[in-house]
Amino acid sequence: MASQQDIKRRIRSFRNMRKVTKAMELVSGAKLRRAAQRIEALRPYATSMAELIGEAAGRTNLAGQPLLERRDVRATAILVLTGDRGLAGGFNATSLRRALEEARAEQALGRSVRWLVVGRKGAGSLRFRGIAVEHAFTGFTDRPSPADAEAIAHRVVALFAEREVDRVVMVYNAFRSALVQSLTAQDLLPFDIGAIAEKTPRELALEGDLLFEPEAGDILADLIPTSVQTAIYRALLESAASEHGARMTAMRNASDNAEGLIDGLTLAMNRARQAEITQEILEVVAGADALT
């Protein structure tokens, strides 16, 4: 049986650990609330963007838009969103697992795969597996900005427009709640105008016809890359909120586990102290018997 000093040392270590995990849980909770507010703030902009694209698409010939071109897929770019830090439960592992499944499905069809990764954890894990990462975007997963989304969008649009890849897939954890994150694999390119048109009713027509200056086709050529950037930015915000939620849950579980270990060790220490007291009493009694 361990001595009282050893047990006290272990209890002190677990108490210090519980302080750290509790603090990390509170910090993640505060960051989660801010991330959720940013997601809510982006929704009206994304909705208005979809309405404008749907309206412009109905006014022009879509044949000249390079980001709408659907061609035989020979190469696929996978953009996977992870975090820069760990201690977030299965947040990073689940994104990578889903992205690897997507890659295996593409390779089974005879297509090559090119990797773009957001987050140090994802990039490090793929490189550890011997997978070449074409570009890693790091240092901002905790609080992404529109400029970060613009840099990523510029890269994926260039790959598609220059015909280096024929399809771009984004894999990320969509935020549902602090306890629930939904793995999502979203096709970024070629851009799907039809999906936007189906989701966007022509409510603008109630206020009269829109006049486009310059032409709707020219505006659409600018709107599509901007919409891709918006989709990436929204996914970055969702991924950040999911990471904070996963970390908050993981730290809460760690704190609860530490509490259980402290209770168990406290009970063991009481038993050890009682055993020592009993042993001392027995020694005193034995010494008294020996003197009589």
Image (tube, rainbow, N blue to C red):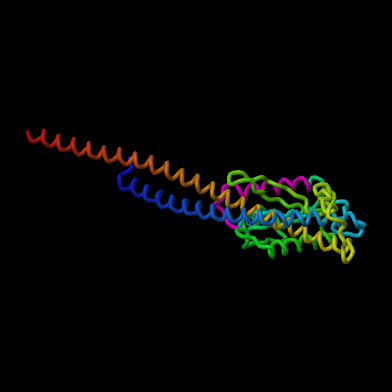
**Residue 289 lies in quadrant:** top left
Task: Tell me if residue 24 comes above or below residue 262 in the rendering.
Answer: below
Does the magenta portion include 97?
Answer: yes
**Residue 64 position (above or below residue 269):** below
> Residue sitting at 70 percent across and 54 percent down?
43
Residue sitting at x 43%, y 50%:
18
Q: Quadrant of the C terminus?
A: top left
Looking at the image, which is closer to me, 127 or 77?
A: 77
Horizontal and vertical percent position of residue 70? 87, 52
**Do we see residue 93 in this rendering?**
yes
Give the residues drawn in magenta, as a range: 84-106
Tell whether 282 sits left or right of 291.
Answer: right
Q: Residue at x 42, y 41 (%)?
A: 260
Q: Is residue 65 above or below residue 268?
A: below
On the picture, is 33 further left or further right than 164?
left
x, y percentage for residue 208?
A: 86, 56
Q: Residue furthest left?
A: 292
